[in-house]
Amino acid sequence: MTERAAKDSRIRSGEPRGQDQQGQCVALRGEILTFLADPEYPNGDLNPDAWQHWSDGLVICRNGRIEAIGPADQLLPLLETDCALHDVRPGLILPGFIDTHIHFPQVDVMASYGETLMGWLNQYTFPTEQRLADATIARETADFFLKELLRNGTTSAVVYGTVHAHSVQAFFEASEALNTRMICGKVLMDRHAPDGLRDTAEQGERETRKLIETWHGRGRQQVVITPRFAVTSTPEQLRSAGNLLREYPDVYLQTHLAENRHEIETVRGLFPEAQDYVDVYDRHRLLSPRSIFAHGIHLSDRERERLSQSGSQVAFCPTSNLFLGSGLLDLAGLEAAGVTTSIATDVGAGTSFSLLQTLAEAYKVTHLQHQRFSPVKAFYRITLGNAKSLGLEAQIGSLAVGSEADLVVLDPEATPLLARRMQRCQSLQERLFAWMMLGDDRAISSTWVAGRCLHRRSAEPRKKEPTA
Ligand SMILES: [Zn+2]
């Protein structure tokens, strides 16, 4: 690449989002993998044009965005002297991971024994969420949660707060301080929940509206309208959520759907006029391309079709589904029906913050149903795939020039076992599979947000002088 071509490939427009990043330049040298499109054809063949891979690459970030990316030998001579070069070899540089369904207040209920969905909510989750009535606890929990995401290589997430509006306020303040791109919402819940955890339809709408007006689009923060699920919202509250979704055309909606048989029976009793669970949400105008339905395990053909027609997405949460004994998601069936899917941890019913561990469980869930879950597609899912499901592929999910510079570096020698296994791998696919089956937070050597290193697992990587 000539110097002119390299400069031409750099970002020419767009204001930097990280205000403390003005003019700052960092470059990471290592193996690089980033996706341009879905790498798998419907018949399972891989499309090698759908990703970019450099065994010795360089990614240059300036003002919090990707400025240039390519082979190290071509880009290093062009590196400007103000750029701090981090050599992360033999690490693999990927876009930061994206989690489409997670509850920040539930950090403290992870690994609570022996329940299925409804018992788990009543026995563990609701008492824990009540503690966040205290704003200090909310802020401390948000800080811990965000740190834990970064330790696991997750740089963006779609997050539930509690019913307390101040929990979301605390979350956004913590996220804004880190300059992470986060989507969060206040839980709407006006029935079938204990004292202190219920709002009203009117209060829920007023508080959500205020959060949208304060936080949506402020820096990298975005708001999601968050009725917990049909059991805990009256028809009036669901209707108000649908009105908000229409009123704010770029705000998201998230809720839970068809996770557990007992839950489905309860919903049927509460909404006898609806033909099925999806119809409950449909009647209240909650289906849209900005709507994220967690789980969707037990769905009829009609429900899948309606989700597909409306462009709604289902977030697959394998560790949670296994932990609560909810069932095995028919991922291939959903995708064959045209439903957009994403992949998520669902902490705290999810058992790990790690999207690598989540991929491992997703592999087992699909394998049990004789479905394909290839490692290349798996890494696409937790990066560009999840970004696309949120309509954020221009901002995050890839290392394309102009994208926000959220990156993760995977360590092939994170554990003695991983290092030993990696030595036997012959291809990138094999190494990706080893990372997702054997990796967890230990495999994340560093996490970068808007071009700034916010997590480094061990000693600081060698910092070299620019070679040109
Ligand atoms: Zn959930």
Image: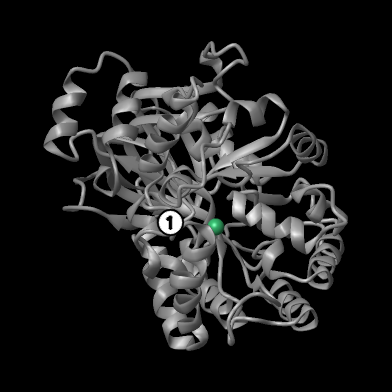
Residue at 40 percent across and 34 percent down: it is 78
Q: Is residue 328 left or right of residue 412?
A: right
Look at the image and tell me in which quarter the C terminus lies: top left
From the viewer's perspective, is 218 left or right of 79?
A: right
Find residue 160 and report its horizontal and vertical position in percent. Answer: 57, 65
Position of 295 relative to 188 (above/below): above
Whether 41 is drawn above or below 225: the answer is: above
**Residue at position x 45%, y 22% from top?**
374
Quadrant for residue 128, please give it: bottom left
Count of numbered labels shown in the rendering: 1
Q: In the figure, is residue 336 to the left or right of 59?
A: right
- Tell me if residue 132 comes above or below residue 276 in the rendering: below
Instruction: Classify mark 1: residues with Cα within 10 Å, few (<14), some (14-19) or many (20+).
Output: some
Q: Residue 330's spot in the image, x, y percent? A: 58, 31
Q: Decide which of 69, 119 is in the foreground and name it.
A: 119
Residue behind mark 1: 24
The quadrant of the rendered image in which ligand 1 is seen is bottom right
Q: Residue at x 56, y 45 (%)?
A: 396
Q: Can residue 230 be spotted in the picture? A: yes
